[in-house]
Amino acid sequence: MYRKIKRIIDILFSLIGLIILFPIFVILIIAIKIDSKGPVLFKQKRMGINKTYFNILKFRTMKIDAPKDIPTHLLNDPEQYITKMGKILRKTSLDELPQILNIFIGDMSIIGPRPALWNQYNLISERDKYGANNILPGLTGWAQINGRDELPIELKAKLDGEYVSNISLRMDVRCFLGTLISVVKSDGVVEGGTGVKNQVASSKENMSK
């Protein structure tokens, strides 16, 4: 029952978000165009619900000659590809704002496992163990507030599985509020690396807070 209500919440809040944030969208579009040549939006093939594909939308943060379909953390010296405006967008997570449209049309949810790249086979395989590929991916999620880019794939998939097992309004509120805190503090953003955090608090302790 909650999953049906969750979709209604997604539609309502994404529509409100698109309306309220429209002035910010305009400002960012102008800033991106001034900073570097190329399209404003970046489209990338991602894994959606039940392993279907969709194009995720982001504000472009890299130069147009950057390698495609390769996670930033797998690039050699990713800094050489990131634009000046892109550094700001990534640090503040403002590059993710266009995904509000993905949420509105039903490709994503506000809260859920972050959508994997179509070729992130290890992450997709690990998520299969926990049923985390069988729900809508999210703008943010349980793994994002527990380490984000710092998490190794195995732990990230496990946390995504915990979200699936405990999906509820309470869980979504916790993820949303935790995301606001993480964005303000820029927690877990590691350009050029992943799995940096080898020790994190146990998920059981996190769930019991």
Image (spheres, rainbow, N blue to C red):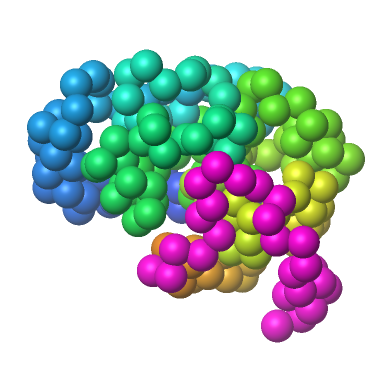
Task: Please name whichever residue, 169 or 35, is drawn nearer the observer in this view of the structure.
Answer: 35
Along the viewing direction, whichever of 5 and 182 lies nearer the viewer: 182
Where residue 63 sits in the image (x, y, percent)? 32, 25
* For residue 179, side relative to residue 101 (left or right): right
Residue at image x 75%, y 56%? 159
Residue drawn at 65 percent across, 64 percent down: 146
Residue 105 higher or lower than 177, as above or below: above
Q: Residue at x 46, y 52 (%)?
A: 9
Q: What residue range appears in magenta?
A: 184-209
Position in image of residue 168 (x %, y %): 66, 62
Indicate whether residue 51 is drawn in magenta.
no
Quadrant of the rendering where the C terminus is positioned: bottom right
Q: Is residue 197 left or right of residue 176?
A: right
Q: Quadrant of residue 188?
A: bottom right
Q: What x and y, as percent, mark residue 186? A: 44, 63
x%, y% of residue 163? 72, 56
Q: Is residue 78 left or right of residue 81?
A: right
Q: Nearer the viewer, residue 197 or 12?
A: 197
Query: From the viewer's perspective, is residue 29 above or below residue 160?
Result: above
Indicate left or right for 21 with 192 as reference. left
Q: Quadrant of residue 196?
A: bottom right
